[in-house]
Amino acid sequence: MNRLSWFNTVSLTLGFAFLYIPMVILIIFSFNESKLVTVWAGFSVKWYGELLQNEAFLNAAWVTLKVAVLSSTIATVLGTMAAYVLVRGGRFLGRTLFSGMIYAPLVMPEVITGLSLLLLFIGIGMDRGVMTIVLAHTTFSMCYVSVVVSSRLVTFDRSLEEAALDLGCSAAEAFRLVTLPIIAPAVISGWLLAFTLSLDDLVIASFTSGPAATTLPIKIFSAVRLGVSPEINALSTIMIAIVTVGVLTASLVTKHQLVRQRRDEQNAVRT
Amino acid sequence: MRRFLLIAIPYAWLLALFLVPFAIVFKIALSDAAVARPPYMPQFDWITGVWAFLSKLDFENFTWLTEDDLYWKAYLSSLKIAVISTFFTLLVGYPMAYAMARAPEEWRPTLMMLVILPFWTSFLIRVYAWMGILSNEGLLNQFLIWLGLIDTPLVILNTNTAVYIGIVYTYLPFMILPIYSALERLDGSLIEAAEDLGCSRMQAFWLVTIPLSRAGIIAGCFLVFIPTLGEFVIPSLLGGSDTLMIGKVLWEEFFSNRDWPVASAVAVVLLLILVVPIVLFQRNQQKQQEAEQ
């Protein structure tokens, strides 16, 4: 490919400026001395200090983390099972319904999912709290996991599994020793996706949480509704920093793995 | 036995936590408002049989939706906002996707990463970031006044314009990624051939590039349009009191007015509106998959 034309350079520059300037401004103003978020009054980290003393935010952060870890882990197990069934399951009763239920939550408006789950929990008399949010998050994120994992399973060379079976592996061993390591990158990115979806969710959590369990997005939303505040800027900066570090690490790890895999393949061809 | 469990566990989970809840929404949407007076719910009466259930059905909540013009105005204005913001997202996203696909190969992973990174960052925070920029004494107005373009601050926050900006901003990656993947597969020699045959660059773009990236454009538009229609966060943070969006109406009907049957009916109608774009989207995806094979 040749170098970028001026038009392409301009559209990339403007596009990325549009994507990143709001977040950069947010980060800069989290270090603002003034309570007014639009007037710069000198550098300060005091909002971070206040944030760390804010019990309500810390509690909410803890609840959010618990919910995210639990729901993304269950969702990864269920989603991987569902993906396996979709790609390898063959025919079974209600297959169309099953795949429909996998894809439908991806496009469902959150307000509807939240409303329907709340009505269910009330209908069966379940107290709302951490448990109900976990159930709700698991349900929608398992669908994302299964889409990610099944795209990997589709391109998977089945003969590797058959070879393992021929060499005396049981079906479970073949799955554990051959299939799982190969689909592992998809399973891990499925887990990460489920984890971030859960951290991020406001609407469904609002419907399914009770007074005892408030997640961070619910807390942020109710604070933000009253206007812009430097404490929220500080909180946002911390969250953006965590995500950036996480995504960069993940991409470096996968890049490293890819390089190693290619080297191994080349070595295998040579010997 | 093992195969049975493998199928049964996720199946049962989805039935219990996805399909059954929907059935309940339908049921409540059709049940009498008086029986289901909030915040108390009637006990579910699966045992009394289907007939008893059917005899209680009425469409009162749906007729209510047609009588109060708040609802159909909200549906129409949601549709309008979704269409306009999808169009603008395409307008911003296409050139970016195009430039990414044309960028030197070694840049592409980094550019991809830069598009995906905001997607991993909290949606709520990305919407919030605009509140400080768009407000009357916000940075955009300060900047425009400093440039001398305006004397008095523009009112942007709490208007539909702010909602459009918020939607284009947060949904941009959903538009860029499918278009990029369509454009990246595009065979460059086709454009050369068109130019050799006498097309100008512009003509080659309209006659070759756009049609060949159509599947990506369609996928991107649906990925923006479908979730936007039920959007709640953006209109409540950036929109004003005159911004009517159905997701917000449903939320308020439920949490503020506590009228659950009407909220359920609003949800059912929203779902019915969404059936068409969702089916079209799936057809487009299937066609694309077949084309790849």
Image (cartoon, coloured by chain):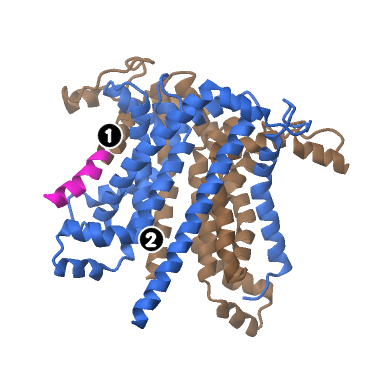
Query: Between marks 2 and 1, how big is the CA–CA gap?
Result: 28 Å
In x, y percent, where is residue B85? 60, 46
Q: Main secondary structure of the magenta part?
A: helix
| Farthest bottom residue in view | B196
Look at mark 1 in the image and give the residue it sits on: B20
Specify start and end residues of the magenta stretch as a single range. Answer: B1-13
Q: Classify the position of the C terminus of chain B by image quarter.
A: bottom left
| Image vertical order of residue A251 relative to residue B291, above or below | above
Vertical side of A8 occupied by A116: above or below: above
Residue B96 visible in the current orientation? yes
Amino acid bearing label 2: Gln
Against B124, residue B171 (above or below) is: below
Residue B135 x %, y %: 72, 32
Residue at the spot x=84%, y=33% of the render? Answer: B152
Tell me where residue A114 sits by quadrant.
Answer: top left
Mark 2 and 1 residues: CB-CB less than 8 Å, in contact? no
Q: Residue, x 29% and y 53% (percent of image)?
A: A83
> Label 2, on which residue?
B286
Q: In this view, does B196 lie to the left or right of A213?
A: right
- State which chain disc 1 sits on: B
Please give the chain letter of the residue carrying mark 2: B
